[in-house]
Image (cartoon, grey):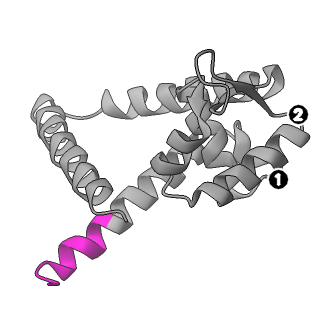
């Protein structure tokens, strides 16, 4: 089953380092500086990218058990960072949005990370940009496969 152990190890390492470095390059902006857990920060980032996402959709996207996602939502709502509403057509469905204070943090962090990444991409050769674009398609396919295998 473990046919490419070196690739698995390298992929974990590279993706992890990229994510950490992007956060560091953002100059301390973002949810990481707020004292939130990584799970809380990830949920807020997801909601920031997907306003009005349902609690169930958020749980699936983050690979969380529904009750775990619900606990995170309750905590973040109590802390004033997340606004929980109801779906217009099905009142049983909870919809999530960032509170204004959290939205400001998300927007600032996103701008800083995008600027840092754009600056770094500008230093790559055109052929490297092409290779990166092709690799992104493969990573997206890996992500899809992993999501389909979830119980």
Tell me which numbered mark, 2 or 1, is placed earlier along the sequence: 1
Q: Position of residue 131 (x, y in %)?
A: 12, 40
Q: Secondary structure at mark 1?
A: loop
Q: Is residue 91 left or right of residue 4?
A: right
Q: Position of residue 18 (x, y in %)?
A: 42, 52
| Of marks 2 and 1, the one in the foreground | 2
Q: Quarter-wise, where is residue 118 in the image?
A: top left
Residue 26 shows in this picture: no
Q: Residues within 10 Å of mark 2 (few under 14, many from 20)?
A: some
Q: Residues within 10 Å of mark 1 (few under 14, many from 20)?
A: few
Q: Is residue 14 magenta?
A: no
Q: Which mark is residue 80?
A: 2
Q: Residue at x 9, y 34 (%)?
A: 127
Foreground of the two, 8 or 91: 91
Q: Secondary structure at mark 2?
A: loop
Q: Residue at x 28, y 59 (%)?
A: 146
Q: Residue at x 55, y 58 (%)?
A: 64
What is the quadrant of the N terminus in the image?
Answer: bottom left
Q: Is residue 138 left or right of residue 18?
A: left
Q: Which mark is residue 35?
A: 1
Q: Identify the magenta region.
A: 1-11
What is the quadrant of the C terminus in the image?
Answer: bottom left
Q: Is residue 5 left or right of residue 151?
A: left
Q: Is residue 142 above or below residue 88?
A: below
Foreground of the two, 66 or 50: 66
Q: Position of residue 105 (x, y in %)?
A: 73, 29
Q: Position of residue 2 (x, y in %)?
A: 17, 84
Foreground of the two, 115 or 40: 40
């Amino acid at each position: 089953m473990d046919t490419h152990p070196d690739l698995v190890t390298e992929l974990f390492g590279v993706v992890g380092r990229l994510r950490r470095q992007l956060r560091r390059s953002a100059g301390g902006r973002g949810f990481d500086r707020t004292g939130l857990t990584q799970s809380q920060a990830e949920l807020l980032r997801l909601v920031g990218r997907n306003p009005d996402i349902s609690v169930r959709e958020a749980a699936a996207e983050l690979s969380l058990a529904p009750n775990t996602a619900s606990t995170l939502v309750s905590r973040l709502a109590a802390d004033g960072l997340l606004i929980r509403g109801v779906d217009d057509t099905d009142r049983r469905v909870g919809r999530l949005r960032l509170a204004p204070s959290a939205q400001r943090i998300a927007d600032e962090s996103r701008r800083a990370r995008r600027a840092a990444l754009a600056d770094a991409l500008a230093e790559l050769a055109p052929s490297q940009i092409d290779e990166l674009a092709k690799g992104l398609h493969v990573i997206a396919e890996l992500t899809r496969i992993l999501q389909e295998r979830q119980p």
